[in-house]
Image (cartoon, rainbow, N blue to C red):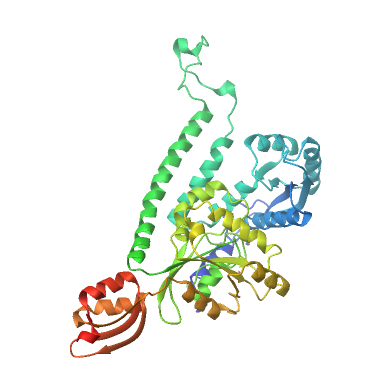
Amino acid sequence: MRNEPEDFVNGDYDLEERQALRRVAGLSTELEDITEVEYRQLRLERVVLVGVWTSGTVIDAENSLQELKLLAETAGSEVLEGLIQRRDRPDPATYIGSGKAVELRDIVAASGADTVICDGELTPGQLRQLEDVVKVKVIDRTALILDIFAQHAKSREGKAQVELAQLQYLLPRLRGWGGNLSRQVGGRAAGGVGIGGRGPGETKIELDRRRIRERTAKLRRQIKEMSTARETKRSRRSSRQVPAVAIAGYTNAGKSSLLNRLTGAGVLVEDALFATLDPTVRKARTPEGRLFTLADTVGFVRHLPHQLVEAFRSTLEEVADADLILHVVDGSHPDPESQLSAVREVLSEIDGALDVPEVVVINKADAADPVVLARLTMKERHSIVVSARTGSGIRELIELIERELPRLDHEVHVLVPYERGDLIARAHQEGEVLSVEHTGDGSVLHARVLGDLYAELDRVAKPVETV
């Protein structure tokens, strides 16, 4: 039984579990009469990265390949080489062209790699023809991101969303076993092929496609049912008029760290891409005591697969339904401007998300270049610089959130009967209570509240001036 430090929180347990070595019994062949097998480092998949540089500067192309390297390492790979080719557009046959594909095959053979990862989404034909040349497994950026999501999904809804995205990606990329294994309808419809030509009437690939479509339809129904609970919670918060703040941003920008710093949520924090996928909603309060909710959402990345945007739509709707978006960006990243534009590109695919007020939170100030921070704050006028690790700028951020939340337009000074103490409690939770005085006839409440609570107080309470 492991020793557990007393100061462990939920995220620490998750991180320890993710990084733990797992023993598989019975796989050792070099020893006999084994009484105890030592833990051994598993052999990582050895990969070569290749990208096509079609636009922008060479620095942009290298940054994109560096991000692909981080993605590959997050998926559990050892990166051996990284190659970039300058082209006007990817080759429609082999992505990098037939000559460069042969060069890539020689590099793969010399380095001992067993996988090639391409920095883009390849068509089924490109994948097949490039594999035929390099003689090892070839995957694209989309498949890599889907694999990371599959590793990190924990909740039932998250697993269903990832499986749906994987099936949508897999459907056009299925490969058959050849026409000679097809089975046709028997009798005269078989074209006179005789005995052995009769069968169910579908090829193996057609059966697989039909099963994928059936599974996809089932997953869509399940996700719709599971999203009902999320919508119910959201509508309950809305009916109580609790303001909602959504944390959105690039993967590994520090969204979960910021949530932990603001609310003490204790969610998993790891220096890896897409470390957390399942959204977390926590309560928080402004310095004046006003209640609001903070929702941590899934991280974004350049060219986020459209299958994931579609599958995680119910989760991303937390952003569209918010009253304020905290757009977190990594101030220490080599190209933070591209992170901002990539996130906004995904948000544009969510109805209503671009209409929500946005505050750009430039995180990791303790590790960032001051020149970069100054450049970002000049470009993003509505921004604030913080460090979730050290706590720098957090107090100013909370004060900014308080100013940006929906205004408390109604000021009340009323006598509330003691039997309606629930209205006093709502004023504390949803509004700003200036004073409460208990008298023989009830509680005299002086507060600023939203319209819904104002209407209820107007119906039940009496103005103090008329008492």
Q: Position of residue 440 (x, y in %)?
A: 18, 90
State which quadrant residue 439 falls in.
bottom left
Q: How many numbered badges does the structure rendering display?
A: 0
Q: Is residue 118 left or right of residue 199?
A: right
| Residue 266 visible in this rendered orientation of the protein | yes
Q: Residue at x 47, y 21 (%)?
A: 201
Q: Residue at x 47, y 17 (%)?
A: 198
Above/below status of 52 relative to 256: above
| Residue 43 visible in this rendered orientation of the protein | no
Pick whichever, 383 or 154, lies toward us: 383
Pick whichever, 84 or 56, lies toward us: 56
Q: Residue furthest front?
A: 466
Pick whichever, 288 or 211, lies toward us: 288
The C terminus lies in which quarter of the figure? bottom left
Q: Position of residue 333 (x, y in %)?
A: 68, 65
Q: Position of residue 270 (x, y in %)?
A: 59, 66
Q: Is residue 445 left or right of residue 270?
A: left
Q: Position of residue 357 (x, y in %)?
A: 50, 65
